[in-house]
Image (cartoon, grey):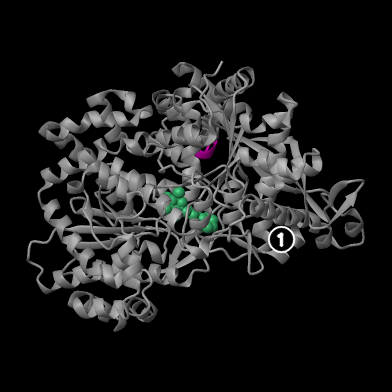
Amino acid sequence: MPTKTDLRDDIQHHLKYSLGKDAGHAQITDWRLALSYAIRDRIVDPWFASTRATYAQKGKRVYYLSMEFLIGRLLEDAVVNLGLMDEAEAAFKANDLSLDDVLGDEPDAALGNGGLGRLAACFLESLSTIGCPAYGYGIRYEHGLFKQSFHEGRQIESPEDWLTQPHAWEFERPEAAFRIGFGGSVEELGGKTVWTPSEAVIAEAFDTPIIGWEGRWANTLRLWAAKPEQVFDLDRFNAGDYYGAAEPENLARTISRVLYPDDTTDEGKRLRLKQEFFFTAASLRDILRRFESEYDDLELLPQKVAIQLNDTHPAIAGPELVRLLADEKGMPVEKAIEIARGCLSYTNHTLLPEALERWSEGLMRDLLPRHMQLIEEIDAAHARENPSRGVTMTDDGDVLMGPLAFAMAHKVNGVSALHTELMKETVFEELHRLHPDRIVNQTNGVTPRRWVLSANPRLSALITEAIGDGWVDDLERLSKLEPMADDKTFRDAFAAAKRANKADLANYLGDRGTNVDPDAMFDVQIKRIHEYKRQHLNIIETIAHWQEIKDNPGAGWVPRVKIFGGKAAPGYVFAKEIIHLINAVAEVINTDADTGHLLKVAYPANYNVTLAERLIPAAELSEQISTAGKEASGTGNMKFALNGALTVGTLDGANVEIRDLVGAENFFLFGMTADEVVKRREVEGHAQKAIDADPRLKRALDAIRSGTFGPGFEGIVDNVSGPDYFLVASDFTDFYRAQREVEKAYADQDAWTRMAVLNTARSGWFSSDRTIRGYMRDVWYSEALAAE
Ligand code: F58
């Protein structure tokens, strides 16, 4: 390990020689970049050693193909994993700077929308911690997820610009570039099928090393940037057409310009399909090139290469791998399908029908003519192998990416136990019957290095003091804390850590205009805004509660701060109305002198990974209130439980497993089950019936309709009292009851802390290390290695 002086010297060295600044004139960003380069230098050797070990031991490599990697900040992760926090702190203290300020200067890499992208980032870190040889493959978006601000309570989107400053972590690889074609025609030439694209772009690689815990192993995140084949049209420029001259470059760069901000609904854009093919095709070429540098028998591919498709976004990998093996390497198509299937596996993250990708056959044929032919061949081969089948890869003029991914994968997994069972019963019912061994479950997890150790240093110190530091890469050791739930001194220390985190958050919220009492209960719902996640159930319950408090302010209420965070897809009108309503309710409630000391609503703008790292350690109540059957897993729910928040939630996604592990008595359950939800929808007028039966709900909805929070919210009331597909009205009464149970429990602070300790102690299973080991065992058949 480098010594203190080493790191300090290296920071000074980079400040001077990499950034050209002297200490007297350096800005915080200069210091941050200097530290980043000094840390990056320390990652390169273990990174090379990991690559050497993989070649030397002929290890199987895992390739994680994902349109999204929501990595957030990288510097702190790297400093923590290299065990250099103290040295870095000392180095900056010597220059009168705080390490926190330096770390806080880094922009978030927001290359993802939500849970799916964040899961990919946790997986990268766990793959390195475990020493599983792996690459993440994705797109180097110039602009990640949009920035959110509020104007008069409404969401405003502006472009995100993480790359305006130098990005210290990546290495550009101009030599690792592939030509990716689109369109054109397919011909039979001399017994060979030849696709001649009509346009093409260059995919150029940028590599970011991802270091695991204690620097034992490092893998690579390889992101592709689109570049034009021809940088500049000189003829057009010389003819005075300056804009036209730059057109080829603009067209090509559009592909990696911006992350699609759609959450669960896909608008079916041509550019999106181009992005999907662009990064999938470049990744597969790279994978084959690496394989062929070591082996000359393509039949070995499934033994040496595992390719995980993160949802169907890279599902074109099936036909593309078949094309590479058949058309370019001369393998018979049926054999190519078998080899490709041996390598590929697919993770499903949603059952929502509108989120299951489909592309029109016309678009597919136009953009990827050879792939459309191969999809038909894959479909025909599947029909031959399964003569009784009804399911097809195409339907009503569309290619169905779910069935295609399923047919081309040797394993298909869901992300929680309930979700996996529902996959078998619903979207993949027939495919599951035909291939009963293909679907497996791999319940999601989160990396404890980021979500406990760095995000919550106070709790981490307490845990380490109590049970040693082995929990950081063996999270199930948290169970050793269980007996300490009965130790008053430990409970007090646990409560003090939470209280200090709450005070930090109260300052943060106060600086942004919402003053909150750090002794009130901190109740948090953070996630994408979506009807199925039911932020509107939460805010309607808040209104009902406020009305009750106003009726009788002296009734001994438990003070609460309701905290919301999350973005809505720019085109999702209803979700944006929910945001507007939450802000409008906040405005009224927060200025109400009768209730101000008892209830506040805070909605800090621009929820992202960094804000999550601030909110989760300070949370006491975790809102996981989706309509049962709709949330595939959730991962925020795991982060909260690990950080000692209690959950109020439905039996949905991984909530089911959380409740099983932490104990029903330490979890506030409410609402219908997935089966009951389906039945309830069949009851005519279910929403109105629920409203008629609950005067509190009626009163809250009436207040919204009559303009208590301003005009323009009739749409939400009409929806909740009319179609109410997500059953807000029908689950309201039980939610209200559960919230009063929460308050009753919170009133006994010591008993609450005991439950909180048990949540932490019993959530160790939710480490993404456990999830990755499950994939290695059941899906990838791969092994961990030690660096040389
Ligand atoms: C999420 N999906 C699930 N999709 O909703 C969540 O339950 C689960 O825990 C998580 O995946 C990880 O398995 C999700 O985040 C997206 O963001 C897609 C982005 C691209 C467009 C469609 C939605």
Q: Is residue 315 left or right of residue 293?
A: left
Q: Magenta residues: mostly which secondary structure?
A: helix
In the figure, is residue 61 to the left or right of 490? right
Image height check: is 244 above or below 438?
A: below
- Which quadrant: the C terminus? top right
Residue 460, picture quadrant: top left
> Where residue 391 sits: x, y (%)?
58, 60
Quarter of the image holding residue 465?
A: top left
**Residue 182 occupies which quadrant of the picture?**
bottom right
**How many badges with numbers are in the image?**
1
Q: Residue furthest bottom?
A: 706
Residue 171, how many percent across, how many down?
Answer: 65, 34
- State whether residue 71 appears in this view: no
On screen, 528 above or below 686?
above
Q: Residue furthest front?
A: 388
Q: Nearer the viewer, residue 573 or 424?
A: 424
From the top left corner, tell me how far across and down residue 369 is, in percent: 77, 57
Query: Is residue 761 shown above or below 160?
Result: above
| Residue at far left of view | 555
Tell me what residue is drawn at x 80 percent, y 56 percent: 248
What residue is disc 1 on? 364
- Towards the viewer: 678 or 41: 678
Q: Which residues are magenta?
A: 25-30
